[in-house]
Amino acid sequence: MNTPLDSPDAASGLASRAVGPWRLWRHGSRRDRWLVLGGWGLSVLASVALGLATVVFEWSGLPIRFGGTQIYITLYPPLLICLWWALCFGWWWGAIPAYLATFTLALYAHMPLGWALLFACANPLGFAVPVLGYRAAVHFERDLRSLQSLLFFVQLVFVGSVFGSAGALVWSYTSRLDSQALLPIWQGWWVGSFVQGVLLVGPLMALTWPALARWRERHPDVLSENAGDVRQRVLLLIATSVMGVLIYGLLTIWLATGRLDQAREAAQPAAIDEAASTLASTSWVFYWVFALIVLFLGFFIYQLFQRWFQSSQALVHHLAHLASTDTLTGLANRRAVLQRLTEQRQRQQRFGEGMGLIMLDIDHFKRVNDQHGHDAGDAVLRMVALRLSEGRRGLDLVGRWGGEEFVLVLPGVDAGGLGEIAERLRQQVAQTPLFHGEHRLFVTVSLGLAVLRPTDAAVDEVLKRADQALYLAKAAGRNRAECLA
């Protein structure tokens, strides 16, 4: 199973960035513009036509028996098209065709213009929830290949469906429907949106998102900037989810009790029994919905905590690495060298393990800086660091002591072995040219060698001997090694 944190697309944050129409026009190829913009234009026309079909063929509030309970479902094909665009390309790509489709069918049904303008906002409002969810939690994959990403998608679609079903109230009010007709329309709206989103949009996302993710990686210029604080988006998502379940519970109980009150006023026993049964079934539905939302929030918060913990651990390791690393050469810094020397002295006292030390200085380094500039000097330092690191054992430590001086800590190496290693390093540096601009530079190094003694009271003593040996090497003409074992 893929872990969301390991996803390159999620890690880079590309998935959370919308495709900008103007950026696509400026930076996209002609093929991309035709495919994306042309496909979106056809989607707008298809959404409007299918939205009208929902009214003409009366695909709303269809009764279905499920688990001994009668539920209602509305088939609304534009939802599939528009939700896919919103998730894959950005909220506006799905919101515009969804708004136009709903606005057109509202006018066809003779809804007043003002109410039609408000009614058309329902589905775009519902799309905002899953889009916001993926912007807040960029580590969840949209290809739905893992159980975690699938559960996250299902919960987002559910909350979005509840928010989008607010349009059912506008429809019922403008159509002057009674409470008995209001419940099927409202329940059919959110159940239909949820079922179609999970069973149809979900598989469509699983099929198309991998290719779209690769396309995004190849065309980052067409993506808008990822503005906003992630923490704010997370808090907004949690608040939106909580608000969604509260709205759902309020509407469920209000509609069901309204239906029961109307039956009591009519004094019809059969109607009262039916309304009471509806109230009981909707109450149970609300319980399971509430349970799912609680599980969703718990799962989401756990994922956030896990991601925060892993990020904190990575940050601690990174800071520890920076604290012990020389930024120019990538070698251990003076602090790390002293720590290793202290550890090796402790090992010698406990296990009798010896250690050799090489202190190395680049000959006439100031001349390189004066004649060729500090850039050339930095390049020489990196070249020498590379040569010192080549062929070292895993337990050896190569560090930059300061300026043009380097130190090698070599556990288990005696004076004889130390001399062989020093001579090999001296030859490698001397025989390796450095090309800087039009110049071909050669540098040499002087080396001071010392061995940690059991009588050394502190690591300063072996460092002092190595430094004295280095001084002798320089005094003897440089480009040589001297040892004070």
Image (tube, helix red, strand yellow):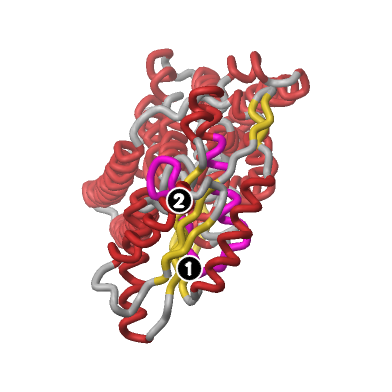
Q: Is residue 431 above or below residue 395?
A: above
**Residues at marks 1 and 2 touching, judged by CB atoms closer than 8 Å:** no
Name the image quarter holding residue 42. Answer: top right
Mark yes or no: residue 315 visible. no
Tell me the tag on residue 410: 1
**Residue visible at 67% across and 26% down in the picture:** 439
- Of residue 130 and residue 160, the one placed in the foreground of this image is 130
Q: Is residue 116 above or below residue 297?
A: above
Q: List the single residue furthest toward the right.
A: 31
Residue 359 position, x and y percent, is 44, 55
Residue 399 position, x and y percent, is 44, 54
Residue 158 position, x and y percent, is 43, 49
Q: List the single residue furthest toward the front.
A: 476
Tell me the tag on residue 238: none
Which residue type does callout 1 highlight?
Leu
**Residue visible at 50% across and 50% down in the picture:** 476
**Residue visible at 59% across and 37% down in the picture:** 84
Tell me if mark 2 has few (under 14), some (14-19) or many (20+) residues whose alpha carbon lies within 10 angstroms of its own: many
Quarter of the figure that contains the N terminus? bottom right
Residue 468 lies left or right of residue 55; in this view the side is left
Q: Which residue is mark 2?
A: 406
- Magenta run includes residue 406: yes
Mark 1–mark 2 distance (CA, rounded to whole Å): 13 Å
- Of residue 340 and residue 289, the one placed in the foreground of this image is 340
Which residue type does callout 2 highlight?
Phe
Q: Is residue 396 above or below residue 105?
A: below
Say which element carries label 2. strand
Name the image quarter holding residue 166. Answer: top left
Quarter of the figure that contains the C terminus? bottom left
Tell me if mark 1 has few (under 14), some (14-19) or many (20+) residues whose alpha carbon lies within 10 angstroms of its own: many
The magenta region covers 379-407
Name the image quarter holding residue 268. Answer: bottom left
